[in-house]
Every structure is written in structure tokens, then in C-alpha cells.
Image (tube, rainbow, N blue to C red):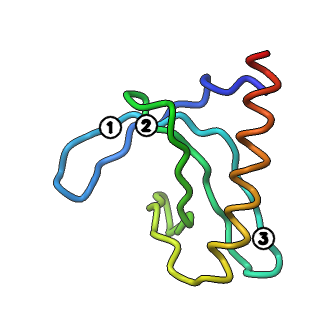
Amino acid sequence: MDTLENKLMITVEDGSKKVINVLDIIDSYVFNKSYMIYTFEDETNALYASIIDESDNSFSLEPITSQEELNYIDGEIDRVASELEEVAA
């Protein structure tokens, strides 16, 4: 997995723009949602996850609020972190 080649420019709530490195996109059939695991380009030591909310020709990243979804995505974040450690070794 080439971890830092999938970059996206996003606009955050305050209107500023940030670059994120997309590490993985997970489709959950249980929750009928897609999630993005990513880092911010300027702080690659922390992993984040958001719900991908697609509409027409754009998408937004929404917070995960359900505890059941948080538990699920925590496992996926652990998996991605483990893969990143293997690649770095």
C-alpha cells in the first residue's frame, strides 16, 4: 500500500484549506456507509476517520457519532496503523 500518494485538498469548517493523506476507504455493509481513514499532511502521526457523505458531484467528511460505529472504525484504524508499521519496517 502506497500510503502517502492519495492526497486531497479539503476545506474545513473555518474556511481554511488542508491537505489530507487518504490511507484507506472502508465500505461497511453493516452500517451502509463508507468511511475514510486519513492523516493531515502536517501531522502524519495521528490517524483520523470520518463518514464519507456523497452528494451529486461532491462529498463531505462527517463525524462518527454512534458508539457502535466508533467501535467498528477503531478496529479498522488499528488495522491500518498495523499495515503502516509493516510498510515502515
Real-space CA distance between mark 1 and mark 2, rounded to the nearest whole angstrom: 7 Å
Q: Give the class, few, some or many, for how many residues have Cα within 10 Å of label 1's Cα (few <14, many ≥20).
A: few
Q: Residue at x 41, y 32 (%)?
A: 43
Under circle 2, the secondary element is: strand
Instruction: Work out whether mark 3 precedes mark 1 in sequence or the reverse, and give the earlier one.
Output: 1
User: Label 2 sits on what residue type?
Assistant: Phe
Q: Is residue 18 left or right of residue 55?
A: left
Under circle 1, the secondary element is: strand
Instruction: Work out whether mark 2 precedes mark 3 in sequence or the reverse, and give the earlier one.
Output: 3
Task: Identify whether 51 is placed above or below 24.
Answer: below
Q: Quadrant for residue 84, please give it.
A: top right
User: Label 3 sits on what residue type?
Assistant: Ser
Q: Is residue 53 left or right of residue 34?
A: left
Residue 40: image tag: 2
Mark 3 highlights which residue? 28
Mark 1 highlights which residue? 18
Instruction: Work out whether mark 1 precedes mark 2 in sequence or the reverse, and give the earlier one.
Output: 1
User: Label 1 sits on what residue type?
Assistant: Lys
Real-space CA distance between mark 3 and mark 1, rounded to the nearest whole angstrom: 26 Å
Residue 61 location (% of width, % of height):
46, 61
Q: Kindly indicate whether the residue at mark 1 contacts the one at mark 3 (C-beta within 8 angstroms).
A: no
Under circle 3, the secondary element is: strand
Mark count: 3
Q: Give the class, few, some or many, for how many residues have Cα within 10 Å of label 2's Cα (few <14, many ≥20).
A: some
Q: Kindly indicate whether the residue at mark 2 contacts the one at mark 1 (C-beta within 8 angstroms).
A: yes
Between circles 1 and 2, the one closer to the viewer is 2
